[in-house]
C-alpha cells in the first residue's frame, strides 16, 4: 500500500463514519509511515486533474481569487524549485511572516515538499520578538510581507530575505518564482519523523516555548481535527484565524485539505459581523470555525435575517459560554460544537457531528486519542489534568519542545503527555473544561474554575471580557475577583458594579460568588489570550484595601 493509499484509507474511514462516533473511535487506525511527505505523497496525488477550488480568497472590496487543487499543486512545485534555487535546503529553518494571501499556501506546500522546517510567525511581532525567534529557532531564511521588511533591519545574523507583495532593497522579490518551471524533483527522502513545523506558543505564564512537529504529527494528526469539524469533500470551510498560530494550520490548511474541501478566506481591515454574515451567505460557506470573541460579535446581529448554507459550526481558542451557543441555535437550528486541543497536539477532545451535545461539555476523546484525567498523585480521577496516553502511540503529538529537554520530559512523564489543563468527566464519558492548572484556585476550601465564573459575567450586556483571579482575603484565604473590560461607550461606575454583582449572584452558587470587581483593560499575549498570571501577581501584591476602579460586594450593597 502506498503512503497515499494508507492516508486516504484512514481519511475515508473517518468521513464514512462522520456521524457514528462509536464506530469511528473504535475502528480508526491512524496511518503510520516510515517515509512520508504530505505535500508530495498526499496533496499532489489528490490534486491530479482536480479542478475543485483548494483555496478561495475574498477581499473586502469584493475581488477574489480561486485556485484549484491542480493549480495549487503546480504552483507550489514552482515555488519549491524557486526556493531551492535560493538556497533553501532540507532541514533549513524558514520563517514565514505573511497575511492571508495566496502565496502563503503556495509557500507552505513548497516548504513541505522541500523538507524545510517552517516557522510560521504572526505579523504582530515586534523586532525583539523576531530576534528571539531567529536565534532560538535557528532561522536561515525569511519570507515576509514587504510591509514587514523594516522589522528585520535590526536583526543580527546572516539569512536569506524574500519579500512578498512588492520590491524592496536588500530583499529578493518573490515574484521571481513565476519565471521558474512548475517542475520539482525533491533531493532525498522525507522521513515521517523529520521536523516540519516550529511554533512559538503564546505563553500565558512564561516566554514562548518552541513546539516542534513532524511530517506525520500535524499532517496526519489533523485527521482528528477534520473529524471533529465534520469536513467533507466539496465543502467550503472558513476558519477565522490569523496566520502564524497553530490554529491557522489546523483549520486553514491541513484539516480542510485532508478532507478535500475548499479553504475559504475573507480578508478585512476591521471585523464587521454584518459583512461576515453576508459573505458566508453569498459565498456558500458550509462550515465555520471562529473564536469566542467573533461569536459574541455575531450574536449582536439579528441572525434570523440570514439563512446561510452552513452545516457545521465549531468554536476555537477558548470554551464558549452557553448564551452564545443558544442564540445561534435558536436562529439557525445549528449547535456550535466545542472541542479541545493545543499547539502541541491536534484536536484531542470534541463534539463531532451527529452526536448528543451536552451543555458546557467539550465532548469526548477523538479518534486517535486515548485520554485520562489524572489527580495530583497521577492517578485516574473524575476531575484532574487532561493527559494523553503515550502507550497508544498517538501520531499527532509534537516531537517535543525545541531546546528544552527538561520541559519536554516534564510533560511526557509516567506514560502520559500532560496538557496542563484540568477537566471533569461524567458517567457518559463527556469532558467538561475547568481551566488551566495554574488558573484554578481555592476559596474557603472550594475549588473555583475561572472559566465558569467568566462565562456568567460575559452574559451581562455591558461586559465585553472578564478574567477571574484569586484576591487575598483574611477570612477565606482568597475570594474570586473579576477584572472586567466593558463594551465600547460604557463607563465604569459604582452602580454598574452593583448591577453586575447582583447579576452574578442570581446565576452562581453562594460559594462561587464574585466578591470584588475591577474595571480595566485585560493584559493579553500576542495571540490574544488573557494573561491571568499577570493579574494574579498584581492582586497578590495588593494590600487589603480597594483602590482605583475596584469595587467590593460588601461596600456597594
Image (cartoon, rainbow, N blue to C red):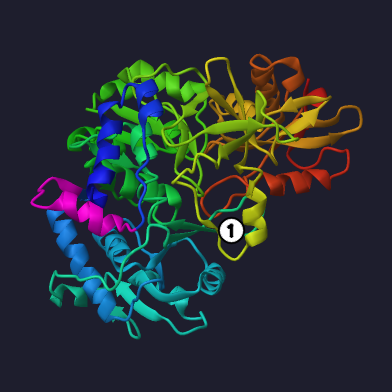
The residue segment tinted magenta is 35-54
Along the line of sight, the residue nearer the viewer: 459 or 519: 459
The image position of residue 420, as x and y in percent, is 63, 42
302 horizontally vs 42: left or right: right
- In this rendering, would 216 be left or right of 5? right
Q: Nearer the viewer, residue 382 or 292?
A: 382
Q: How many marks?
A: 1
Relative vertical location of residue 282 with respect to residue 244 in this rendering, above or below: above
Q: Residue at x 36, y 47 (%)?
A: 220
Which of the 4 image quarters holds residue 231? Answer: top left
Q: Is residue 474 left or right of residue 220?
A: right
Residue at the (31%, 61%) spot, across then down: 108
Looking at the figure, which quarter contains the C terminus?
Answer: top right
The x and y percentages for residue 67 are 16, 53
The answer to whether any part of residue 301 appears in the image is: no
Q: Residue at x 62, y 26 (%)?
A: 452
Q: Which residue is mark 1?
A: 209
Q: Position of residue 491 (x, y in %)?
A: 61, 36
Disc 1 crowd rating (10 Å Cα; few below 14, some 14-19, many 20+) is some
Q: Quick check: is 188 in the magenta stretch?
A: no
Quadrant for residue 386, please give it: top right
Amino acid at each position: 500500500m502506498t503512503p497515499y493509499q494508507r492516508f486516504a484509507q484512514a481519511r475515508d474511514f473517518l468521513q464514512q463514519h462522520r456521524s457514528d462516533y462509536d464506530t469511528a473511535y473504535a475502528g480508526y487506525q491512524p496511518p503510520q509511515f516510515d517515509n512520508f511527505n504530505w505535500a508530495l505523497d498526499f496533496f499532489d496525488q489528490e490534486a491530479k486533474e482536480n479542478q475543485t477550488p483548494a483555496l478561495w480568497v475574498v477581499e473586502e472590496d469584493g475581488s477574489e481569487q480561486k485556485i484549484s487543487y491542480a493549480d495549487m499543486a503546480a504552483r507550489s512545485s514552482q515555488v519549491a524549485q524557486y526556493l531551492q534555487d535560493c538556497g533553501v535546503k532540507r532541514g533549513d529553518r524558514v520563517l514565514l511572516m505573511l497575511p492571508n494571501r495566496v502565496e502563503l499556501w503556495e509557500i507552505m506546500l513548497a516548504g513541505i515538499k522541500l523538507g524545510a522546517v517552517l516557522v510560521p510567525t504572526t505579523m504582530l511581532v515586534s523586532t525583539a520578538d523576531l530576534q528571539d525567534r531567529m536565534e532560538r529557532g535557528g532561522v536561515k531564511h525569511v519570507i515576509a510581507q514587504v510591509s514587514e521588511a523594516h522589522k528585520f533591519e535590526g536583526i543580527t545574523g546572516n539569512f536569506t530575505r524574500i519579500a512578498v507583495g512588492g520590491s524592496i532593497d536588500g530583499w529578493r522579490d518573490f515574484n521571481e518564482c513565476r519565471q521558474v518551471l512548475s517542475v520539482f524533483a525533491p533531493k532525498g527522502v522525507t522521513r515521517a519523523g523529520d521536523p516540519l513545523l516550529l511554533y512559538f506558543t503564546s505563553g500565558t505564564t512564561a516566554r514562548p516555548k518552541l513546539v516542534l512537529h513532524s511530517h506525520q504529527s500535524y499532517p496526519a494528526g489533523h485527521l482528528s481535527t477534520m473529524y471533529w469539524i465534520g469536513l467533507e469533500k466539496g465543502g467550503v470551510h472558513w476558519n477565522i484565524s490569523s496566520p502564524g498560530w497553530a490554529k491557522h494550520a489546523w483549520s486553514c490548511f491541513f484539516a480542510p485539505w485532508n478532507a478535500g474541501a475548499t479553504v475559504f478566506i475573507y480578508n478585512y481591515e476591521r471585523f464587521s459581523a454584518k459583512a461576515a454574515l453576508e459573505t458566508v451567505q453569498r459565498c456558500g460557506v458550509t462550515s465555520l470555525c471562529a473564536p469566542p470573541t467573533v461569536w459574541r460579535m455575531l450574536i449582536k446581529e439579528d441572525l434570523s435575517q440570514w439563512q446561510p448554507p452552513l452545516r457545521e459550526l465549531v468554536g476555537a481558542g477558548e470554551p464558549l459560554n452557553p448564551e452564545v451557543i443558544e442564540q445561534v441555535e435558536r436562529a439557525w437550528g445549528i449547535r456550535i460544537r466545542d472541542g479541545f486541543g493545543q499547539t502541541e497536539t491536534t484536536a484531542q477532545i470534541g463534539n463531532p457531528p451527529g452526536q448528543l451535545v451536552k451543555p458546557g461539555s467539550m465532548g469526548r476523546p477523538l479518534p486517535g486519542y486515548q485520554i485520562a484525567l489524572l489527580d495530583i498523585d497521577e492517578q485516574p480521577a473524575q476531575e484532574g489534568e487532561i493527559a494523553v496516553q503515550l502507550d497508544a502511540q498517538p501520531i499527532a503529538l509534537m516531537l517535543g519542545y525545541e531546546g528544552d529537554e527538561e520541559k519536554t520530559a516534564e510533560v511526557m512523564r509516567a506514560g502520559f503527555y500532560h496538557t496542563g489543563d484540568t477537566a471533569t468527566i461524567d458517567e457518559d464519558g463527556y469532558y467538561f473544561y475547568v481551566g488551566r492548572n495554574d488558573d484554578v484556585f481555592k476559596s474557603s476550601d472550594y475549588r473555583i474554575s475561572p472559566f465558569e465564573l467568566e462565562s456568567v459575567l460575559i452574559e451581562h450586556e455591558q461586559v465585553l471580557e472578564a478574567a477571574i483571579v484569586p484576591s487575598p482575603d483574611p477570612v477565606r484565604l482568597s475570594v474570586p475577583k473579576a477584572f472586567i473590560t466593558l463594551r465600547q461607550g460604557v463607563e465604569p461606575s459604582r452602580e454598574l458594579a452593583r448591577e453586575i454583582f447582583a447579576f452574578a449572584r442570581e446565576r452562581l452558587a453562594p460559594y462561587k460568588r464574585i466578591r470584588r470587581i475591577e474595571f480595566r483593560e485585560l493584559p493579553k499575549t500576542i495571540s490574544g489570550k488573557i494573561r491571568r498570571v499577570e493579574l494574579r501577581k498584581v492582586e497578590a501584591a495588593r494590600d487589603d484595601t480597594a483602590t482605583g476602579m475596584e469595587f467590593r460586594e460588601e461596600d456597594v450593597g
